[in-house]
Structure formats: structure tokens, C-alpha cells
């Protein structure tokens, strides 16, 4: 009995480290799965589905049971059911009931599918055309109504308008998160519904409003734009996005962990990482979905220079919140209730005195009001009185 207790204690203490390692691997596998599912939009932006599957598969392989434990488990499973047949029967029955929802998930139809024998997008110059596009997320409320426009290669198109007018929907349709209900979207004359999603998205880079970073190092977050990129290419992309100097100032440099969804970085830093990621991908078409609207004015101005480098000589579509950021756009579309109500360059739209001119005046008045308030706050601050000398 003493020998049995002694061996039990020794062996139990010996296997503790393996138990800890198993828990660590289990947590890592679950973290990989949750991280990739939460950030599904970013995964699709960079065609990284297979990359995420491989990462999760590697984590599962590290967690798998050893041969000795497997042998012991088989022996237990051989004898125990004979003694506990009723218990196992109830467990199996309960498991099948619990799996019903999973089977229902397997029966879900994919909304956006590639056509049978669909070919790859043959990119030539980057001309984008929307022809009489109609779209709705649900029956009864049409988001886009007969939208038509074209963007010439290398030009910048800006989309402005109130919330709910369909600006971000145009971005999602071009990236083919959804298929149009009517009309057609073409790139270089090819209907994007007739080419593979992977080939389409390989030519498009997106800088979203809400930048999503994985709980990983800054280097790997930038490398997400192109998984095969070298460390030097990652650094070059960071320099182009004007964040290299900031990264090297961190104690761990490019190996700095950003935390879940990038919470350890400021808004401007996260946005520059997203820009660097897109630069590394090297797309010919750039989509900016209100990429700076969540930032303060000073940070926005600094990041505009980085965005200008990304968009140079590339076909670009910008969803703009602040009109001052798109005054140099080659074409501006003003959307309202899913329709294009005005189009033209900045100066032309101001001369028309229509919806765009009203939005411009409203924003200018708001900026002037903010400046006046700031000036009054500064002037109201009183300096402390100087100490008196003598009696």
C-alpha cells in the first residue's frame, strides 16, 4: 500500500507538466479558431482562408493525444461500456440531440458561389463599371436603385452622402461579399459574377474604417497582406505607411504583441498597420471605406499622406465622411436613398449649389464653430498671478 501511494504521488507529479502543456495547446487551438472567426472580414479581404485553416490544423496537431494515452483509453473503453451500457446509451442519445444544430449548419447554403468552370479575372488596366445596379439586403427595402458609374484606370472616385445611402454597400458589392440583384459590375469589361472570388479579391485592397488586427505580433499582422513576404518586405511596407519608426521604438520592435483586436495600439497606429498590410498585398484597385473617419483631425491629416502613397497610380474608390479629404478626387458621387443625385468634381458640385454644396457648407460651419470654441477655451485660461516683492 505504501509503495502504491508513493508511486501514485511520484507519477502524478511527473505528469503535471504534460497536463499544463496540454491545457496550453488546447487554449491555443481554441484561440486560433475564435480569432479567425471574429475577424472573418479581414480573412476574406486577403484570401487567407486556407492560411487560417492550416494555422488551426497545426494547433490541433500539437494538442493530439499520445500513443500511450490512446492505448489506455481504448482499454478503458473496451471494458467500461459493459458495466455502464445504460449510461453510455443516454450519453450517445444526448450527443445526437446536441449535434442537430451542427447538422443544420452543414445544410446552410453558401450565399455567394463561383459559377461552374468560372475563370480567373484577367486584370489589364483597372477600369471599373457599375451598370444599372440594384441591390437589397432583404425583400422590401432596396439599398441601391439603378446605380451607374465608371472609374477610369488610375482615377479616384469618392462616394459621399448621408448614412444609409448605400456608400459602403457599393464597396461590399465590388469586393463581392454579395451578388447584385439586378444590373452588372465589371472590371476591365469582365462581369465579376462570372470570375472566381479568389482571383477578384487578389487584385483588390481594402482599408476599412474599423481596422481589425489579430492577437499576434505587428510583423505578422502586416505580413497578413501577403503571407510569403520576407521580413525586409514587411519593413518596407511599414516605412511606406509611415509607421516603421514608431514600431522600432517599442521594446520588442516588430515582435510586439498587439493584443486582441489590436487594443494595445492607438487608432492611428492600427490604421497605419492596416495601410502597411494593404501596401504589402500590392493590389491594383484600392477601396477606402471611411478609413479615417474614426480618427481625430490631426491624426487624419497625417495618415492622408500614407493613403496617398497607397493610391498613387491605382484605381481607387473612397467612401468619405469628411469632404475636405476628397476635394482632389477625379469624380465625386453624391448618394441619397440609394440613388446618385449629383456627380462631378469638387468645384463643379460647389457651383451647382445642390446637395453637395449644402453638405460642404455645413461641415465648414461646424469646423469654424469648433475652432471658435477652442480659441475661447484658450483665452479663458488665466495665468497665475506673479508673486509680489517687498512688504
Image: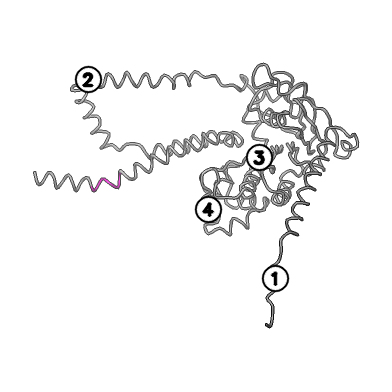
Q: Residue furthest left?
A: 1
Q: Of helix, strand and loop, which one carries label 2?
A: helix
- Mark 1 highlights which residue? 385
Disc 3 crowd, CA 10 A, few/some/many (<14, 14-19, 20+)? some
Image spot of residue 45 (x, y percent): 61, 35
- Mark 2 highlights which residue? 85
Q: Mark 3 against mark 2, which lies toward the viewer? A: 3
Disc 2 crowd, CA 10 A, few/some/many (<14, 14-19, 20+)? few
Q: Mark 3 against mark 1, which lies toward the viewer? A: 1
Image spot of residue 199 (x, y percent): 64, 31
Q: Which residue is drawn at 75% across and 25% down?
A: 337
**Apparent side of residue 373 relative to residue 267 in the rendered image (left or right):** right
Disc 4 crowd, CA 10 A, few/some/many (<14, 14-19, 20+)? some
Rendered position, 16 above or below 144: below
In space, the residues marked 3 and 2 are separated at their CA atoms by 57 Å
Q: Of helix, strand and loop, which one carries label 4?
A: loop
- Of residues 58 and 167, the one nearer the viewer is 167
Q: Residue at x 48, y 36 (%)?
A: 34
- Of residues 136 and 214, the one nearer the viewer is 136
Q: Are marks 3 and 2 in contact (CB under 8 Å)?
A: no
Q: Do the residues labelled 4 and 2 touch (CB within 8 Å)?
A: no
Amino acid at each position: 500500500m505504501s509503495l502504491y501511494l508513493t508511486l501514485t504521488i511520484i507519477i502524478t507529479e511527473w505528469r503535471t507538466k504534460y497536463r499544463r502543456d496540454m491545457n496550453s495547446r488546447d487554449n491555443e487551438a481554441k484561440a486560433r479558431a475564435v480569432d479567425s472567426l471574429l475577424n472573418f472580414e479581414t480573412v476574406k479581404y486577403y484570401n487567407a482562408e486556407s492560411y487560417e485553416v492550416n494555422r488551426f490544423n497545426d494547433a490541433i496537431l500539437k494538442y493530439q493525444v499520445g500513443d500511450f494515452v490512446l492505448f489506455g483509453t481504448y482499454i478503458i473503453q473496451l471494458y467500461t461500456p459493459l458495466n455502464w451500457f445504460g449510461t453510455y446509451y443516454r450519453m450517445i442519445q444526448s450527443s445526437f440531440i446536441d449535434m442537430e444544430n451542427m447538422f443544420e449548419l452543414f445544410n446552410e447554403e453558401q450565399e455567394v458561389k463561383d459559377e461552374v468552370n468560372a475563370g480567373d479575372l484577367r486584370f489589364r488596366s483597372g477600369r471599373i463599371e457599375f451598370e444599372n445596379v440594384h441591390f437589397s439586403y432583404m425583400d422590401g427595402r432596396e439599398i441601391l436603385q439603378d446605380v451607374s458609374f465608371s472609374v477610369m484606370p488610375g482615377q479616384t472616385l469618392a462616394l459621399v452622402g448621408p448614412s444609409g445611402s448605400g456608400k459602403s454597400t457599393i464597396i461590399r458589392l465590388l469586393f463581392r461579399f454579395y451578388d447584385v440583384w439586378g444590373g452588372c459590375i465589371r472590371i476591365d469589361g469582365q462581369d465579376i459574377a462570372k470570375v472566381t472570388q479568389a482571383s477578384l479579391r487578389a487584385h483588390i485592397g481594402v482599408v476599412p474604417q474599423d481596422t481589425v488586427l489579430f492577437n499576434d505580433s505587428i510583423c505578422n499582422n502586416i505580413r497578413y497582406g501577403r503571407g510569403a513576404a520576407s521580413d525586409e518586405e514587411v519593413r518596407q511596407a511599414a516605412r511606406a505607411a509611415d509607421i516603421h519608426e514608431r514600431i522600432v521604438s517599442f521594446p520588442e520592435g516588430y515582435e510586439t504583441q498587439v493584443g486582441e483586436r489590436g487594443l494595445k495600439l492607438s487608432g492611428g497606429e492600427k490604421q497605419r498597420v492596416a495601410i502597411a498590410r494593404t501596401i504589402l498585398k500590392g493590389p491594383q484597385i484600392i477601396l477606402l471605406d471611411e478609413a479615417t473617419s474614426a480618427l481625430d483631425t490631426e491624426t487624419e491629416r497625417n495618415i492622408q499622406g500614407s493613403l496617398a502613397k497607397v493610391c498613387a497610380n491605382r484605381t481607387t474608390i473612397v467612401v468619405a465622411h469628411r469632404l475636405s479629404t476628397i476635394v482632389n478626387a477625379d469624380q465625386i458621387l453624391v448618394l441619397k436613398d440609394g440613388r446618385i443625385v449629383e456627380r462631378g468634381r469638387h468645384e463643379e458640385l460647389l457651383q451647382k449649389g445642390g446637395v453637395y454644396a449644402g453638405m460642404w457648407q455645413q461641415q465648414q460651419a461646424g469646423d469654424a464653430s469648433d475652432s471658435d470654441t477652442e480659441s475661447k477655451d484658450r483665452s479663458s485660461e488665466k495665468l497665475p498671478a506673479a508673486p509680489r516683492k517687498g512688504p
